[in-house]
Amino acid sequence: MSQKIRIISYSPMNKYLSMLKNRLAVGLEYRSNIFGQFIIDLISLIATIIFWNAVFKTQNNLSSYSLNDSILYFFITPLTGALTYIFVSDELGNEIRMGAMSNYLLKPYSLQFEALTRALASKLNNFLTTIPFYSILIVCISVFANHFMVTLSSLLLFILAVFMGFALHFVFDLTIAYCAFWVGEVWAFTHFKKVIFLIFGGLMFPLDFLPSSLFSIFSLLPFQYMYYIPNTYLLGKRTISHIPHDIFLFVFWFVALLLIQRFVWKKGLMQYEAQGG
Amino acid sequence: MKKTKKLFNIFLRYLKMDMMYDLSSRTSFMIMVGVEVFYVVASMIFFNVLYGNIKTLVGWSYYEMLLLVGFDTVMTELLIGFIFANGTNALPKRITTGYVDYFLLKPVPSYFLLNFVQPYFPSLVSTGFGFLLMGIALTHLSIPLSVLTIVGTLILAGCGFAIGASIMIIVASLAFKFSDAKTLPRIGMNTVIFFSDKPHHMFNNVILKSIFFLIIPAVFLSSIPMYSLTHGIAPSYLISALILAFVFIHMSKKIWDRMIINYTSASS
């Protein structure tokens, strides 16, 4: 009896789609963690509302922001974070440190693309879990404050800004993961990234609160794409006239960070050693 | 007394071992300390930006806020260093990997061994920057400090630390019930530190007061000790802090003992 051997040819796209499916399944396995992150964001929002309420007790405006603007800015922040924040460096950094990266090096796919599937899967999981909650929360707060600011154009600009933020963050996070080639723990770098976003990314306050001299420096950096730029597009504080400048700066930083990432990867691989089987 | 001495000796041994371990890779250690310093700098930038736009915040001047931020840095780093980093934060992973067995086999209470004994040394070093901010603030505030005020403030701070640590342990211990609940320790920590750096005058209505003075009394970690240092010790705060510290420590022990029953070893 002749046995037919079926040869399945996998296109590069197929293998990455399979990875994405696996990652999606893994991400949804422990749903309590997604819920936990939602609770953390909620605690942060409560602290923020209490704080800014106290700040605006003595004045009506800070820079061009009213109390409602500020509160909405901070309510949009977790939504933006759910779309742009990347956690790849934690996991990948550990795998490099523990020598588990050898498995990836032996397999016929790019580690960078594999990391991209992880990042995309976590974002897609957010679409099923936290993003609907945050969206409803923003709508509720907008209605409650009688301050509805989302238009179709602001939403489209927000989506474009989120895409730019995601891309920059991904390349930046990969570079942080590669630090594990030299140092024992990348935890400190991940924490460093969060602190950078707090100040330079507009996570702690809208960059408009800064004095103009500092604002002009901060607005040249790539970190503003993580929170400040998407948030201000959705708030309507940034309009379509800013798009050419934002895209130009994005392309510049994306290429620069990509080159740095490739350089660190090549240097790191030369440094990498793993024992055991 | 003998038991306390034994636990203290174990703690000192672990502290020494941890210090040696952290200092063995000096680059990582310096990076970790550098990051903690950068966080303090970030907070300073924020308050400078804020006070560039306002004169006082719920009656707190810039230097009073600087004192609060400095002291909160000290307290937060102590909580991270002694309880969070290698304690509550590591608990979910220790549970899922069955590593808790290793601690349960030792003749020391698991409450102590899993939460306190592995300090994170870089955080303890970082408290120095908090003290620096406090020093700058106190120089500008020029408050006459009496021994009684200092002792009272230290008691309040001790109670605040006990309350903060207890809340963190209570929330983290739920990980015995929910498998791989990695976010629980961070929920516990953030419940405390997101509110501890805010002046307690911000919690000015009945609901907020009930929550932050009674249910999650985060105001006792930094705000009330620093307000007492600058304005004198109020007996009502001192008595409340002592009662709350006692209640929260007792509660965290009870909940820990109740939760650890749910642990089933995943190892071997």
Image (spheres, rainbow, N blue to C red):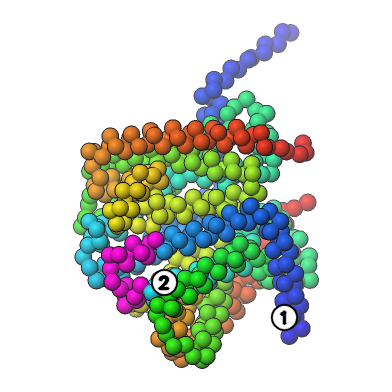
Q: Residue at x 47, y 37 (%)?
A: A257
Q: What is the spatial separation of the Cα atoms under label 1 and label 2, in whole angstroms?
A: 36 Å
Q: Residue tagged by mark 1?
A: B4
Q: Secondary structure at mark 2?
A: helix
Location of residue A50 with respect to A109 vertically, above or below: below
Q: Quadrant of the N terminus of chain A?
A: top right
Chain letter behind tag 1: B
Q: Are marks 1 and 2 in contact (CB under 8 Å)?
A: no
Q: Residues within 10 Å of mark 1 (few under 14, many from 20)?
A: few
From the top left corner, tell me how far across and down residue A108 is, in percent.
62, 25
* Mark toward the start of the polypeptide (1 vs 2): 1
For mark 2, name the chain: B
> Percent position (x, y) of residue A13?
51, 24
Number of numbered labels in the structure image:
2
Name the residue carrying label 2: B66
Q: Nearer the viewer, residue B248 or A81?
A: A81
Q: Is residue A243 magenta?
A: no
Q: Which amino acid is tagged 1?
A: Thr
Q: Is residue B215 left or right of residue A137?
A: right
Task: Look at the image and say whether residue B51 sits in the magenta stretch.
Answer: yes
Could you say which quadrant of the image residue A142 lies in?
A: bottom left
Q: Which residues are magenta?
A: B45-62
Give the camera-side residue of B169 and A270. Answer: A270
- Is residue A133 visible to the viewer in this orientation of the structure? no
Visible in this render: residue A7? yes
> In the image shown, does A74 or A181 lie closer to the viewer?
A181
